[in-house]
Image (spheres, helix red, strand yellow):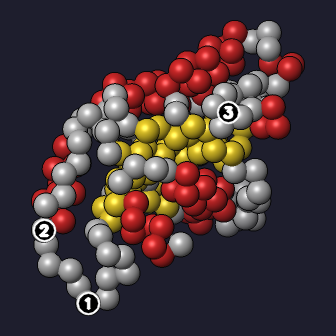
Amino acid sequence: MIEISKTGENISIVLQGGIFEKNSTDVTNITTEYRKLFPDSEILLSISSSDFLDFPNSTENKLVPYKQNLKNQKFINVCNILNSLVDRFVYCDNALPLPPININHPDCNANYQIEAAKRGLKEATREFVLRVRNDFLFKDDSFIDQYLEMNGNARGRFSAFQERIMICSLVYHKPLCCRAPVVSLQRLVSFRETG
């Protein structure tokens, strides 16, 4: 029988996405809530892009803002708080955006989402991984009970993984060309065995 710790000791949480001036407070607050909800979990922040973080001078253990932002107390506070909460930072600087679906939409960020998910999952070390966008927050741990309940269901003959992957039906639709699941919970062995 599968057991998932309610304190998160066998869970890696991969928060993926960009961190910008406009969402930095939200990302910090959401990360704080995940640390409260799963105090013993491993938290990885897989960052696809940023307008204030200095990627070359940041490390897997520390976020550093650009020098021109060192006078901005908000950026300093965001970095200090995230540095105290996150176990490891992952930087995804190799992806490029896709063209917009039409001229009224911004560039499509699907490549950023894919790269941040891949890199974050690769760095996760715990038995189970909760991969979520950095703007999504579970208010409680009831999704774990749902996963455990569904895990007992019969497996189909076309199963791609050895263990079940729980994917939220909530989808973010902006822009339309970049529909992506917001969250997945999976046993890490499944991802590592399939690459």
Residue at (49% x, 25% y) in the render: 85
Residue 79 placement: quadrant? top right
Image x and y of residue 19, in percent: 64, 35
* Label 1 with label 3: CB-CB less than 8 Å: no
Q: Is residue 43 visible?
A: yes
The quadrant of the picture occupied by the N terminus is: bottom left
Dot 2: element: loop
Q: Amino acid at mark 2?
A: Gly
Among the two numbered marks 1 and 3 on one chain, the one whose residue lies closer to the N terminus: 3
| CA distance for labels 3 and 2 | 41 Å
Residue 20's label in the rendered image is 3
Q: Amino acid at mark 1?
A: Arg
- The residue labelled by disc 2 is 152
Residue 123's label in the rendered image is none
Residue at (68% x, 15% y) in the render: 76
Image x and y of residue 40, in percent: 34, 32
- The residue labelled by disc 1 is 157
- Please give left or right for residue 119 compared with residue 67 in the image: left
Q: Amino acid at mark 3?
A: Phe
